[in-house]
Image (cartoon, grey):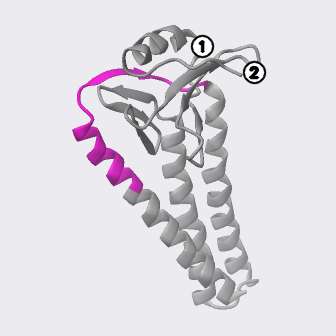
Amino acid sequence: MYWMSCIMFVFALCVLFFVLWKIYKINAMKKSAGKLIATYPRVKRRWIASLGPAYFIGQCMYTYAQYVSGDIGTIEQFLVQSGSYAVVSCFMTLIVIHLIKSVQIYEKGVIDGLNFYSYEELKGYKTSTWEKPKENIFLYRGREKMNDNVNLLIRQEDMNELESILQRYIPKLMMK
């Protein structure tokens, strides 16, 4: 159990540093992306992701309760277990912040959470009503990309305005 906790702690630290690196890269990309044209808030259902950090904070408190009651024998084991939960909760908090962060439209591309999509990279955009009765806008990146359709998940009332902005930069594709 102790070694598994150590491995989980190291893995969680690596993932946390990767997310921090992605945030740094996105902030650097904002400087070269030109002028900010528009910002659109996300749909409200993305807020469910905030349950992730709450779960790991609860696990950290449960580990402390186990240590106080004597179920965890050594201070080292307690520190590794609670440290891994603390690191994972920090990582999840960063992910949640970027999941609920608004979609930003720049002169040279779109920033969607932790990802930047330049207009040169995009093959077009599509609109679809397959998910519930609401319309969604998808950025199409081409079949050669692993995630070829990117769903922006913005609010229904902002769809027409975003579509008029995207028409200036990339062509509209018809849904199949």
Count of marks overlaid on the render: 2
**Is residue 145 visible in this depiction of the protein?**
yes
Mark 2: secondary structure: loop
Q: Which residue is mark 1?
A: 156
Give the residue at x 75% y 21%: 130
Instruction: Quarter of the image for the C terminus: give it.
Output: top right
Tell me the residue at 68%/64% (across/down): 59
Q: Residue at x 43, y 14 (%)?
A: 167
Give the residue at mark 2: 130
Q: Residue at x 51, y 8 (%)?
A: 160
- Which quadrant does the N terminus fall into? bottom right
The vertical placement of 74 against 94, above or below, is below
Q: Amino acid at mark 2?
A: Trp
Out of 3 and 157, give the one closest to the viewer.
157
What residue span does the magenta drawing correspond to? 22-43
**Is 170 or 61 nearer to us in this picture?**
170
Q: Where is residue 82 drawn, in percent x and y?
A: 60, 73
Counting from the top left corner in percent of width and height, residue 69 is at 74, 79
- Magenta-span inclusion, residue 38: yes
* Label 2: few (<14), some (14–19) or many (≥20) C-alpha neighbours in 10 Å: few
Does residue 139 show up magenta in the picture? no
**In the displayed structure, would residue 136 be above or below residue 101?**
above
Which mark is nearer the camera, 1 or 2?
2
